[in-house]
């Protein structure tokens, strides 16, 4: 399925991504775990996960992302669930493929890799006190990436990349699979106004982008970033990357284990923002946490008309 995506990239055509899979699973009533967020929903509520994917396909997404963000190699290692991770990812990709077949679609299926660690309860912060030596972290990331490749995903999405250590190690593991790798970088404002990696204020966003752009991915996207900061983040990306560029912002906030749907961007406003980001060079549009099928339908209608 990736050949269709590659053709669009080569021609500079618009590509529509899906929205927030985990948050839409929650929105449909599936309880979120304080340890693994939406990961175990693949096992406990596969029908709901499939329905989310199908709705994004129906809304016009060209790529759906299997529900593998929360099966973080670091998180599951900390929970002593390394083998569970492999099985959950196999199930997640199978669910996504089943959704594509059910809609008789040519949509590509991506596998997501994150650097998520145990969450601080009641917040959107990772517990940075839990860490791994570089060699161990690289081994865990490689294990997840290789497993995703074996499941037959069309590409790998590196999501919520926000630092120059774990994000780099994870990305290099994905690169070794030989699959197309799309990097999603995430930014937020530090108290002094500086743009930094989301949840990693010691890393300037500029340094994160420069480090990850050097791995030469297929695409770089600004994702899980406030729509208010996305334009500034794109400017940073463009200083270090002249390839295909995507945007998929979040809306609302995480209060572990649940996403709080507060002040969610209306679909017309997301379209308006996306048109502005298009003037900065973006050609790939979608949504992250808090963004649902209605948003993707609006983007598809606007950009595919």
Image (cartoon, grey):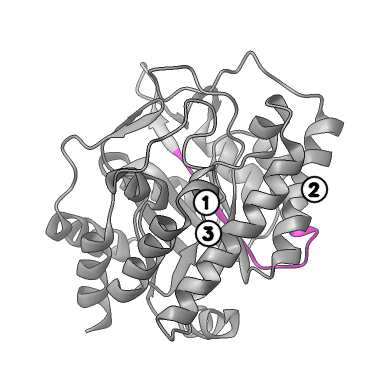
Q: Where is residue 157 shown, x and y percent of the image? A: 57, 57
Q: Residue at x 66, y 58 (%)?
A: 90
Q: Nearer the viewer, mark 3 or mark 1?
A: 1
Q: Which residue is mark 3?
A: 66
Q: Which residues are magenta?
A: 175-186
Which dot marks residue 42?
1
Q: Residue at x 60, y 18 (%)?
A: 128
Precedes in sequence: disc 2 or disc 1: 1
Would residue 175 be visible to someone looking at this image?
A: yes
Q: Where is residue 183 shown, x and y percent of the image? A: 57, 54
Q: Residues within 10 Å of mark 2 (few under 14, many from 20)?
A: some
> Do the residues under discs 3 and 2 have CB atoms within 8 angstroms?
no
Q: Residue at x 32, y 67 (%)?
A: 55
Precedes in sequence: disc 3 or disc 2: 3
Q: Secondary structure at mark 1?
A: helix
Quadrant where the image shows the N terminus: bottom right
> Do the residues under discs 3 and 1 have CB atoms within 8 angstroms?
no
Closer to the camera in the image, 16 or 196: 16
């Amino acid at each position: 399925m990736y050949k269709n995506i590659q053709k669009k990239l080569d021609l500079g055509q618009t590509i529509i991504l899906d929205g927030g899979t985990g948050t839409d699973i929650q929105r449909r009533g599936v309880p979120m775990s304080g340890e693994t967020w939406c990961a175990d929903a693949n096992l406990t509520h596969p029908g709901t996960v499939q329905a989310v994917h199908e709705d994004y396909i129906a809304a016009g997404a060209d790529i759906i992302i299997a529900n593998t963000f929360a099966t973080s190699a670091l998180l599951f290692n900390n929970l002593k669930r390394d083998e569970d991770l492999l099985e959950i990812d196999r199930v997640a990709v199978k669910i996504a493929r089943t959704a594509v077949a059910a809609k008789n679609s040519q949509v590509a299926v991506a596998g997501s890799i994150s650097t998520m660690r145990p969450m601080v309860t009641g917040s959107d912060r990772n517990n940075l006190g839990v860490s791994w030596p570089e060699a161990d972290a690289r081994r865990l990331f490689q294990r997840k990436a290789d497993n995703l490749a074996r499941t037959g995903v069309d590409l790998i999405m590196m999501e919520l990349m926000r630092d120059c250590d774990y994000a780099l190690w994870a990305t290099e593991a994905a690169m070794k699979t030989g699959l197309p790798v799309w990097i999603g970088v995430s930014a937020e404002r530090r108290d002094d106004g500086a743009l930094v990696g989301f949840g990693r204020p010691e890393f300037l966003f500029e340094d994160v982008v420069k480090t990850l752009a050097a791995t030469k991915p297929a695409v770089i996207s600004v994702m899980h970033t406030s729509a208010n900061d996305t334009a500034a983040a794109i400017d940073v990306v463009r200083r270090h990357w002249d390839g295909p560029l995507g945007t998929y912002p979040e809306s609302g906030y995480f209060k572990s284990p649940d996403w709080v749907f507060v002040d969610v961007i209306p679909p017309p406003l997301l379209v308006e923002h996306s048109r502005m980001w298009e003037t900065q060079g973006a050609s790939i549009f979608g949504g992250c946490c808090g963004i649902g099928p209605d948003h993707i339908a609006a983007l598809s209608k606007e950009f595919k008309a």
